[in-house]
Amino acid sequence: MYAIVDIAGQQYKVAKDQYVYAPKMEGETGASVTFDKVLLLDNGKGVEVGAPVIKGAKVSGKILEHVKGDKVIIFKKKRRKGYAVKNGHRQQYTKVQIESIG
């Protein structure tokens, strides 16, 4: 059983007891969250596709921790001009464990 869920504008394929790194969400560690925008649901018997979402379907999970992603280096340069800029960025994510799909 799996579902495709829209979390903060991005689509994730989730299954029960799976960990998902979603963009940072409000809430403390241990708090429960529900995702209402279920786009596709596969329960083993058949696939149900929403138009655009499935009414009444929800995916619930629990926030495990707030983490930072890997560092991304941004390097800009203009040749022969003496211009070079190096910046770094670490995106913030929320680790969510999927508890139930339904």
Image (spheres, rainbow, N blue to C red):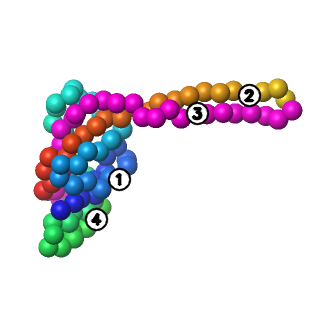
Please identify, in this view, whether the residue under mark 1 or under mark 2 is nearer the observer: 2
Q: Which residues are magenta?
A: 55-80
Q: Residue at x 34, y 30 (%)?
A: 67
**From the viewer's perspective, is residue 24 above or below residue 39?**
above
Give the distance between the C-alpha atoms of the residues marked 4 and 2, in whole angstroms.
48 Å
Q: What residue type is disc 4 on?
A: Ala
Q: Amino acid at mark 1?
A: Gln
User: Magenta span: helix, strand or loop, mainly?
Assistant: strand
Residue holding disc 4 = 51
Residue on which disc 2 sits:
84
**Outermost residue to the right:** 80
Q: Which quadrant is the C terminus positioned in?
A: bottom left
Q: Residues within 10 Å of mark 2 (few under 14, many from 20)?
A: few
Mark 4 or mark 3: name the one nearer the start of the chain: 4
Does 84 appear above or below 101? above
Res 73 label: 3
Q: Amino acid at mark 3?
A: Ile
Q: Earlier in the sequence, mark 3 or mark 2?
A: 3
Disc 3 on helix, strand or loop?
strand
